[in-house]
Amino acid sequence: MLDNKGGNSNSNQREDLIDKFLNIFGVKVIDSLLADREFIGDKWLAFLVRNGIKFYIRIKVDLTIGRSEKELVSANSKVRKLKNGENIILKGERYLGKNYQGPKVKIAATRNDEGELVIVATNDKPDQALQIYRQRWAIECLFGSLK
């Protein structure tokens, strides 16, 4: 249990936890890491890539993405025209945020049946990112039951 007064873990705490796990079990037992919008950041993503951990992380719709410093747009501007049930995989790899310090990622997005945009960043298979990320819903159901 982390003493964060109800807040999220920071990158250092997450890295320490994953390091402990890797020291005991190794990276081969990790198929991929699924995470919600709060678990993002250049340092954290670089840590995952450096340790050979595939990830599928939902990003905020207003997060800046781009292939270069000349292409800085919000993720929403690239996907906002999607209709409910449609999805898209953006071409190429992109940086997240304005600092360009983290690794480049691939982006997949959909607009769900309720009209909400779901944008997932991955360092693995963008064509499977949305399907894989959907598995996270079981975790949310567990959290709801525990609360």
Image (tube, rainbow, N blue to C red):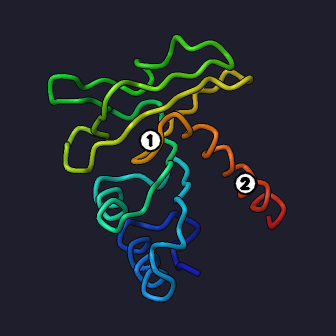
The residue drawn where x is 35% and y is 42% is 105
- Name above or below for residue 28 compared with residue 80: below
Of all residues shown, which one is farthest toward the front? Answer: 28
Secondary structure of the residue carrying tag 1 is strand
Is disc 1 in contact with disc 2, using a CB cutoff of under 8 Å? Answer: no
Residue at mark 2: 140
- 90 vs 57, left or right, is left
The residue drawn where x is 42% and y is 87% is 23
| Mark 2 crowdedness (10 Å alpha carbons): few <14, some 14-19, many ≥20 | few
Residue at mark 1: 121
Please tell me in which quadrant of the rendered image residue 100 appears.
Answer: top left
Of all residues shown, which one is farthest toward the bottom? Answer: 24
Secondary structure of the residue carrying tag 2 is helix
Question: Marks 1 and 2, Cα distance to the nearest angstrom?
Answer: 19 Å
Question: Which quarter of the figure is the C terminus placed in?
Answer: bottom right
Q: Nearer the viewer's eye, disc 1 or disc 2?
A: 1
- Name above or below for residue 30 compared with residue 70: below
Q: How far from the left and from the top, in percent, is residue 107?
A: 43, 34
Q: Nearer the viewer, residue 47 or 1?
A: 47
Amino acid type of the residue that numbered disc 1 sits on in the rendered structure: Ala
Amino acid type of the residue that numbered disc 2 sits on in the rendered structure: Glu
Q: Earlier in the sequence, mark 1 or mark 2?
A: 1
Q: How far from the left and from the top, in percent, is residue 67?
A: 23, 30
- 87 vs 78, left or right, is right
- 41 vs 137, left or right, is left
The residue drawn where x is 52% and y is 11% is 81
- Name above or below for residue 40 compared with residue 87: below
Q: How many marks?
A: 2
The residue drawn where x is 39% and y is 47% is 123
Please tell me in which quadrant of the rendered image residue 85 appears.
Answer: top right
| Mark 1 crowdedness (10 Å alpha carbons): few <14, some 14-19, many ≥20 | many
